[in-house]
Amino acid sequence: MSETIFSKIIRREAPAKIVHEDELTMAFHDINPKAPIHILIVPKKPIPTLADVSEEDLPLISHIHKVAQTLAKAYECEGWRLVVNVGEKGGQEVFHLHYHFLGWPKE
Ligand code: AMP
């Protein structure tokens, strides 16, 4: 897998508005937001796509969902959505697994 901008952000070699970091993930604002709150949740492990996730990665996937719950609480979202684009045909542009957290806060 070739290096992506997300690996550089994880190593803090490229700028990003980071909102969360733990041993397994980093979350930062999408530069081209499609919702009032648009954050990317990215595993530090450079898995190219959701199709490449293996059995051993399942705890990581469940952890990403926990991070999404944490963001929803932190941003007081009334509604939110998690989106994963898979493959070029699925709209994926950056080939480092990421979950789009799209949130709509309470008015
Ligand atoms: P996808 O189409 O699912 O691969 O989504 C890639 C997302 O990454 C898009 O929504 C882009 O706006 C976002 N993106 C690309 N480069 C950066 C960056 N340097 N910082 C934050 N978000 C980025």
Image: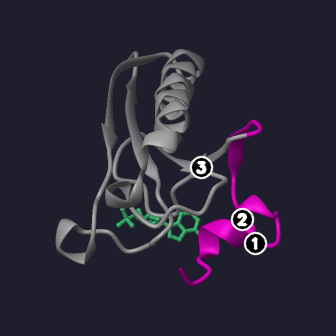
The kind of residue on which mark 2 rests is Ile
The residue tagged with tag 1: helix, strand or loop? loop
- Graded by Cα atoms within 10 Å as few (under 14), some (14 to 19) or many (20 or more), the crowding at tag 1 reads few
Q: Residue at x 71, y 65 (%)?
A: 9
First in residue order: circle 3 vs circle 1: 1
* Residue, disc 1: 14
Mark 2: secondary structure = helix
Residue position for label 3: 43
Residue furthest to the front in view is 55
Task: Say whether disc 1 or disc 2 marks the residue closer to the N-terminus.
Answer: 2
> Relative to 74, is 89 on the left or the right?
left
Residue underneath mark 2: 9
Q: Which colour scheme is used?
A: one colour
Splitting the image into 4 quarters, where does residue 6 fall? bottom right
Alpha-carbon span between mark 3 and mark 1? 16 Å
Q: Of 63 and 69, which appears nearest the observer? A: 63
Residue 105 appears at what percent x and percent y? 42, 23
- For the residues labelled 1 and 2, say whether their Cβ atoms are less than 8 Å apart: yes
